[in-house]
Amino acid sequence: CCAGLRNLLQGLSFSAKYYSKHNLPQTMCPCSKIEPKNCHILYYSKSTCTPRTAPPGSILPCRFFSCKEGTKVPSKRKQNTSIPSDLLHKNLLKSEQENWNDISPTYKAMTKRIREKLEELHNMYALNSGSPRMRFGENVYFEENGCIFLAKADDDEGNADILFSIEDLGFSDAFIQRIRISPDQRYMAISLKSENSEEATCIIMKLGNLPVVEKVITSVFSFEWAANDVLYYTTQKNLKCQNVFMTTFTYQKHTKLVYTEQDARFFVDLYCTKDRRFLTISSNSKTTSEVWLVDCRHPFEPPALVQARTTGLIYHIEHRKDQLYILTTYGEPAEYKAILSDNYIHRLMKAPIAFSGKENWQLVCALEKKTKLVDFEMFSDDCVMFLKNAGHLYLNVISFISHSVQSIKLPTWACEFELESHPEHTTSTCYFQLSSPVHPPKCFAYSFKENNLIEQAVQEVPIITNCHTTRLLAKSKDETSVPITVFHNKNSKELHRRPLLVHVYGAYGIDLNMSFKEEKLMLIEEGWILAYCHVRGGGEQGLHWHRDGCQHNKLKGLHDLRACIMLLHALGFSQPKHTALAAASAGGVLAGALCNTDPALIRAMVLQAPFLDVLNTMMKTHLPLTIEEQEEWGNPLEDEKCMKYIKSYCPYQNIKPQCYPSVFITAYENDERVPLTGILQYVQKLRKAALDHASRTSKKGNWIPNIILDVQANGSHCDSSWEHSLNE
């Protein structure tokens, strides 16, 4: 299944998952796992390929700006990469590895019990949903266990033929990230990725009785077929995508550079409109967009600009019946007021192809303030907007025929959408899944003809009935209301005695990930309370929510987090000595800051690949993402006030001798965004501060916190396979 424009909608950059579904006149539908019986042997020409690894079962691209907990997405954060010396690094790493080896046996029995429980839940829920199916006329393409199969739509999938096998090609540890079939089904482009690297390898195969490898392209991020034998692709270097190439496979085979982005703040991606009329080259920073169109009927002609980049103007393009449909933040001047306005409200607008500049954009539909546009899907006669308002999810269905808008509120337990693909562009039904951290995905459909929501009972999975969902609002320091989503077992008594796990992120305009995870359900079953704090800096209440929590407003996110935890305790949800705080990637900034300012509010903190030294990182412009991220954190090199402001909350800079909570950090040796050295230095400094405090005080009951670092030899900032995740 496919997510949508999550990064455009959650913080100004377009989601690669959206691009993955807009690839061809092909569709996917959920189906149960199969064991193909009749297989063709794969033949391939000699090519040099670098083996890659990562999660099996995914065919979606994977470039996101946040660490969405439990999803196969990399987070948008890097760390200070300056290494005092290789020897110091090695000594620190060796010391931490020895410390971990001494400590880990303590948890052996607990680890065994948790592993068995998670495997049980995984088998019960996760395996009920098969991998996506791509329907292409009479053919169905699908991926299972590192192989790509082809079956007839009306035939038993047990007779499917193998088109591609990771192991046969020598990529034993790789996973399939993205699949694109050419319009005439003569070629198939596949990207393979490693959990130890963010770069992918694209393999183009010529299909037929004996599929063969036609071409191998390294360091590829996104790719789309513009025509039967014309492939456009972007290359990735140092975590940046700035070049677009076109390559052909018949007649005069050649490859040429089509587009180069000169501004280091911008990231280039490709996607096709739903009807495949245009391939779009989309260049995005955190605050600004620019889109170029390649007419798929004339793929060799130069791309045409839709609207030149304008600071603060974000837009995304779809197409229907010779009209461009533009999802954007743009509006009337009196309403918009450029980037200084609070009115970061998404609008759907339209314009003729030949006159695509913003002066010709006409309003189709506008969202209310504080409404978050989570996803967007275009059909021939309708479009569907997946929205979030005050924590509740609902749909807006816009009919292009009747010019009406219908709003449908979704079940109160739902926290996440996941769009399914569709049989065809002219389908009369929109399929999607709803889930929450403790509710496994459940299939729903909206019928355009009947104008109603249908709950599909196609999965035989147990229904979660013993979990209560509560939505709260905490008053922050400036009286802003901050949403909190709380889950707990209905049968739990004396909630003030129950352990509480608080989640926070608050950066890049990205929501906290609230999709289903087996470990969350396990905690609920064992009496835990789960709380998700939707603080400013994230995107839960629209684009203004992000703007109110970045750059010179970053402390507002810290104030929000403090207010949320204090409200939870005041309402009887646990107490400080039973409270743990969890964060990942850039979420480590707010979690680490709270650990410095209010250590008494929590007993433990769990961080995954955390960003902990904002100041030193943003002072080093040679790092691959620093310039790009000045729109999020500011530029301390040119602005002394910015430098002082960052220093006021930076977790590493504000460590001091005091009674800290226990801390558990997971880091990855191969993480390109959060290099290990910075985390090693943070752990050393934090441990020293805790020991200094303990040595200075003789207070009764004084304790020394556990500060533990687990360095994973495998893995990167991307989440890993189920097996690796389970071990972790």
Image: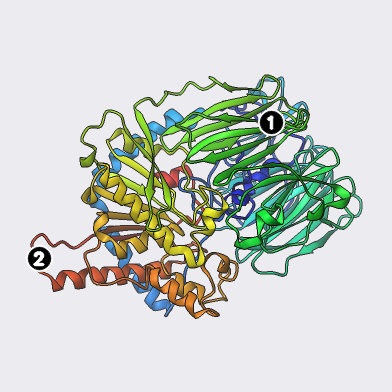
Of circles 2 and 1, which is in front? 2
Which residue occupies 60% across, 37% down?
386
Closest to the observer, 284 or 567: 567
Task: Read off the residue under disc 2.
Answer: 699
Name the quarter where the N terminus is drawn: top right
Q: Earlier in the sequence, mark 2 or mark 1?
A: 1
Task: From the top left corner, tell me how far across and down residue 418 is, in percent.
Answer: 57, 36
Type of the residue with mark 1? His
Task: From the top left corner, tell me how far across and down residue 713 is, in percent.
Answer: 43, 59
Closest to the observer, 396 or 8: 396
Give above or below for 13 relative to 623: above
Element assignment for label 2: loop
Quadrant of the rendered image containing residue 431: top right
The answer to whether 55 appears left or right of 229 in the picture is left
Q: Residues within 10 Å of mark 1 (few under 14, many from 20)?
A: many
Quadrant of the rendered image containing residue 234: bottom right
